[in-house]
Image (cartoon, rainbow, N blue to C red):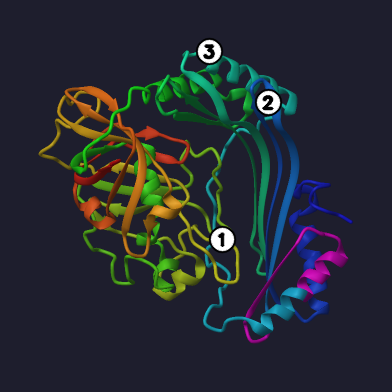
Amino acid sequence: MENLNKKKFKSVLSEDNIRNRINKLAKIQNINKWDLGASSSNDVSAQVYKGEAKQLKASQRSSITIRVWNKDNLIGITSTSDLSDAGLNRALESANQASKYANKEETPEFSSLSKSKVSEMNRPIKELQGIKFLYTKLIEAEKELLNKHASIIDVPYNGFSEVEYERLYINSEGAYRYLNNTHSSLYLYAKAQEINRKPRSSGSIKLAYGSSDIDIQSCIDEAAIKTTKHLDYQPIKTDKYLVCMMPEAFLDLIEAFSNIFNARSILDGVSLSNKDSIGNIISSPLLTINDNGLHKSNIGAFAFDGEGTPTKDLCIIRDGILESFLHSEATARKFGVLPTGHAGLGAKGSVSPEWLVVKRSENSSSNYEHLNHKEYKGNYVLIENLNALHAGVKASQGSFSLPFDGWLVENGELISIESATVAGDIKDLLKNIINIEKEQIITHSGISPYIWIESLSITGEE
């Protein structure tokens, strides 16, 4: 059996090899139209606890999806990891049988851009250092973090991982996409506690193309600083406050409400937008958001989506105006536009953002230019992280009520907030943005400046 965990795609799924084999097998079953998406990865990871190994893991993962269109142009889909002729034959047969029961209202086609030119990635491919390297470095990092401050008593959540992965898309009309890459991540999440006080926690995440390139020291330092800043906490009064959202918090909120610019969500009736929303003012004119999966800071970038459509830099919101939706082939066809490179491979074609880049609109001006988190001495709430997004966001309604970590800032002094939630409506929040700082901060999940919002409801612990 020629499984994906035995050989790399580039040898097993060479264009001539796989296309000729599938065409031959498909012809026997009278299948004229098919495509295939596949991914494979070698993952190595370590977790530790109090100087001992908590979990050491190495795994080889693979996923192959084959879609088949029958004579009525209805689609069937199946998954396999067996690349022998027998395995591919069974997968084609299963997909062909499934096509008899397909939804006639949802029939994706090949992307019209699946054979167009993709951007050169030019990303470095790093050699995996192995489990011993990860384990040793993580043990050292845990020890140093525990010694950073007397109140830091534990590092309950941590991990150091590296992965080499490959991705492929091919179809019966001649499309062929292949990409391989490596990336590594380190996270350290510390817990601090003082006598007769509640424990406080925070952490840091660092990414790089290889584990040997991870800035371990800055991850340790950042985790220690962020954690100890929450020690001297105080309750906050329930009221409406001027709020400054740190980049990660704002990115998480936009991601949670990405149905606003997701064409699949619109067609499914679970979006805050509709087909005619392009051109509508949906936020302060200060706000511009792009989705740029090819950004140089996106360590895990792909040059194409699950349907073979090239990834690109797409402006979603410009100067507060909704400019674009994210599309798969199927949604793009229904909207009369081109796919945007945000699709997964499936019978329906899921759609999701890749790498959000938030910035202040060019030539924009604000009456609140004095609002800067490094200089402003007035009173406001600084939100570091939003929690329980899975439970506290009603995406199709636009409302949210989320616990958060942050500080009440009074005259430049940061006072950690004991426990509180921030609540509101995303449409109101976007229109109540009164300043966007000019400096863009790179995070592990996207890029954003600090965002200032007028009059957000904060509920303190009673």
Q: What amino acid is labelled 1 in the image?
A: Gly
On the image, numbered disc 1 is attached to which residue? 344
Q: What amino acid is labelled 3 in the image?
A: Asn
Which is nearer the N-term, disc 2 or disc 1? Answer: 2
Q: For the C terminus, which image quadrant?
A: top left
Give the left or right position of residue 148, taking residue 136 as reference. Answer: left
Say what secondary structure mark 1 lies in: loop
- Compared to 179, does 339 lie above or below? below
Which is nearer the N-term, disc 3 or disc 1? Answer: 3
On the image, numbered disc 3 is attached to which residue? 147
User: What span is colored magenta in the figure?
Assistant: 71-93
Residue most extreme to the left: 367
Percent position (x, y) of residue 35?
67, 67
**Toward which corner of the image does residue 376 lie, by quadrant?**
top left
Q: Is residue 87 magenta?
A: yes
Report how far apart the C-alphas of labels 3 and 2 lie in the structure.
20 Å
Q: Nearer the viewer, mark 2 or mark 1?
A: 2
- Compared to 308, does 99 lie above or below? below
Number of marks drawn: 3
The residue carrying pointer 2 sits among few (fewer than 14), some (14 to 19) or many (20 or more) residues within 10 Å by Cα, namely many
Residue 255 versus residue 151: which sits nearer the camera?
151
Report how far apart the C-alphas of labels 3 and 1 lie in the structure.
45 Å
Percent position (x, y) of residue 447?
39, 39
Is residue 218 visible in this depiction of the protein? yes
Q: For the N terminus, which image quadrant?
A: bottom right
On the image, numbered disc 2 is attached to which residue? 134
Give the left or right position of residue 441, taking residue 354 as reference. Answer: left
